[in-house]
Image: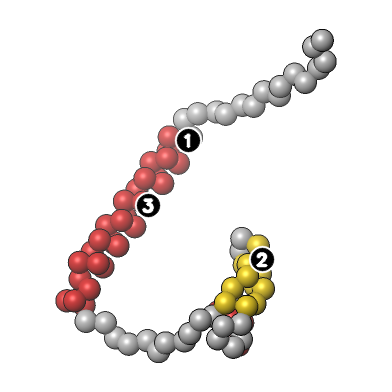
């Protein structure tokens, strides 16, 4: 998908097929990567790691809880009740 997007001209809209379906995307600019100074971004990296770890733990806990329950669906009676 990235290669397809990069083939277009900046500012040009493209229809791209993603895992979630078709999306309209536009590349605004391409900026070359530059190395980061870890000490400058250290707090951001630690917070991102902490958030990602907590999210994984929450998801795992929900999966464990979900295994303890059975969900059943009842259909509504849509008969004519006049």
Mark 1 surroundings within 10 Å by alpha-carbon count, few (fewer than 14), some (14 through 19), many (20 or more): few
- Of mark 3 and mark 2, the one earlier in the sequence is 2
Q: Based on the displayed image, in which of its 4 quarters is residue 31 positioned? A: bottom left
Q: Nearer the viewer, mark 2 or mark 1?
A: 2
- Dot label at residue 22: 2
- Dot label at residue 56: 3
Q: Is residue 28 visible?
A: yes
- Of mark 3 and mark 1, the one earlier in the sequence is 3
Identify the element where label 1 is drawn: helix
Which residue sits at x=48%, y=35%? Answer: 66
Which residue sits at x=61%, y=82%? Answer: 12
Q: Which residue is mark 1?
A: 66
Q: Quadrant of the C terminus?
A: top right
Q: Residue furthest left?
A: 39
Which residue sits at x=51%, y=81%? Answer: 28
Identify the element where label 2 is drawn: strand
Horizontally, residue 66 falls left or right of residue 82, namely left
- Of mark 2 and mark 1, the one earlier in the sequence is 2
Mark 3 surroundings within 10 Å by alpha-carbon count, few (fewer than 14), some (14 through 19), many (20 or more): few
**Percent x, y for residue 20?**
61, 60
How far separated are the C-alphas under marks 2 and 1? 31 Å
Q: Is residue 68 above or below residue 79?
A: below
**Percent x, y for residue 5?**
58, 81
**Percent x, y for residue 79?**
81, 17
Q: Quadrant of the N terminus?
A: bottom right
Q: Name the one closer to the observer, 47 or 58.
A: 47
Which residue sits at x=36%, y=51%? Answer: 55
Q: Name the one closer to the observer, 48 or 53.
A: 48
């Amino acid at each position: 998908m990235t290669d397809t997007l990069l083939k277009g001209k900046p500012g040009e809209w493209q229809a791209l097929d993603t895992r979630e379906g078709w999306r309209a995307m536009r590349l605004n600019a391409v900026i070359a990567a530059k190395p980061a100074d870890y000490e400058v971004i250290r707090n951001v990296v630690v917070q991102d790691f902490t958030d990602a770890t907590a999210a994984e733990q929450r998801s795992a806990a929900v999966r464990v809880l979900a295994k303890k329950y059975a969900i059943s669906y009842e259909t509504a009676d849509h008969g004519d009740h006049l």
